[in-house]
Amino acid sequence: AGDCSSVFDLQSCEWPATGARQGHRSADTLRVGGERSVVAAFGAHVARQDALPHLFGHHHATVMAAGAAGVMIAPPNTLRTDDQIVTYYQQASDAIGTDIPIVLQDYPLTFSVQMTPGVIRRMVHEIPAIVMLKHEDWPGLEKISTLRNFEKAGEMRHIAILCGNGGLFLDYEMSRGADGANTGYAFPDMLCDVVRLSRAGETEAAHDLFDAHLPLLRYEQQPGVGLAVRKY
């Protein structure tokens, strides 16, 4: 897509199950990223907390050495309390190096981890490395608005917000203060155009374009066959 400014390497999410091989695959992605920044995504979904330094430290070293701009970290599905969530990300940041930018992935439908706006605000305050939120809560429009209101009130520093969920709510997410999309779709130029139109204040045009694609967006969300529809 013409307005694509970054690449997220989601292949590395499979790590640590396939460890070194995923690190090299991520490095291969970085080599073809060209001038666009590349963020490597990974998480220790089955790791014990005391294993975090080894797991994160090993993988991040490979992708950062290859030129990654940062890492996106997903939470394990064992986290239940706010303190557990904050501790996990704090330990992850300490393990990879506090100077490495982190994208916080919030996807409760897949990870079964509930991050309230309050706990996200707490993590942004306590973990300086967190610079972006990948927002995939569903429904989640109020969460975006709440986070932006925290910023306006001076209660939270600014972070970027990119939205996933197959782009199903992108037009309204943009109107709530999201910065763009970080998801897949058979016609990614549409996602870029909706973002561009929204930023230009052409809200009705953004909605009209989005609505024309909505049936296919929904079709892609079918369990099992959706990704095949998108790719083939």
Image: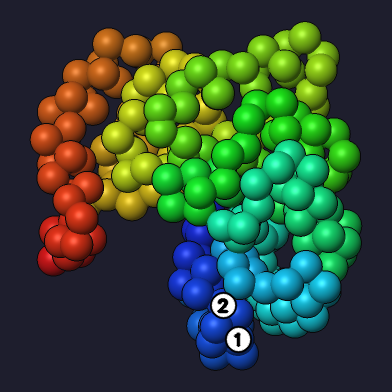
Q: Is mark 1 in CB contact (under 8 Å) with mark 2?
A: yes
- Identified by mark 1, the residue type is Gly
Query: Is 142 left or right of 47, judged from the image as shown?
Result: left
Q: Can residue 54 be seen in this view?
A: yes
Q: Position of residue 81 (x, y in %)?
A: 71, 42
Circle 2 residues within 10 Å: few <14, some 14–19, many ≥20: many
Query: Is 210 left or right of 5, judged from the image as shown?
Result: left
Give the quadrant of residue 78.
bottom right
Which residue shows up at 42% across the image and 12% down it?
201
Vertical placement of 194 versus 142: above or below? below
Alpha carbon separation for disc pair 1 and 2: 5 Å
Viewer-side residue, 5 vs 98:
98
Secondary structure beneath label 1: helix
- Identified by mark 2, the residue type is Trp
Q: In which quadrant of the rendered image does the C terminus lie?
A: bottom left
Vertical placement of 119 versus 39: above or below? above
Residue ID for mark 2: 15
Q: Where is residue 66 in the image (x, y as percent from the top left)?
A: 67, 78
Give the quadrant of residue 154.
top right
Q: Position of residue 149 (x, y in %)?
A: 67, 13
Which residue shows up at 20% across the image and 41% down it?
217
Which residue shows up at 85% across the image and 34% down it?
125
Viewer-side residue, 224 vs 112:
112
Colour approach in the figure: rainbow
Circle 1 residues within 10 Å: few <14, some 14–19, many ≥20: some
Residue ID for mark 1: 19
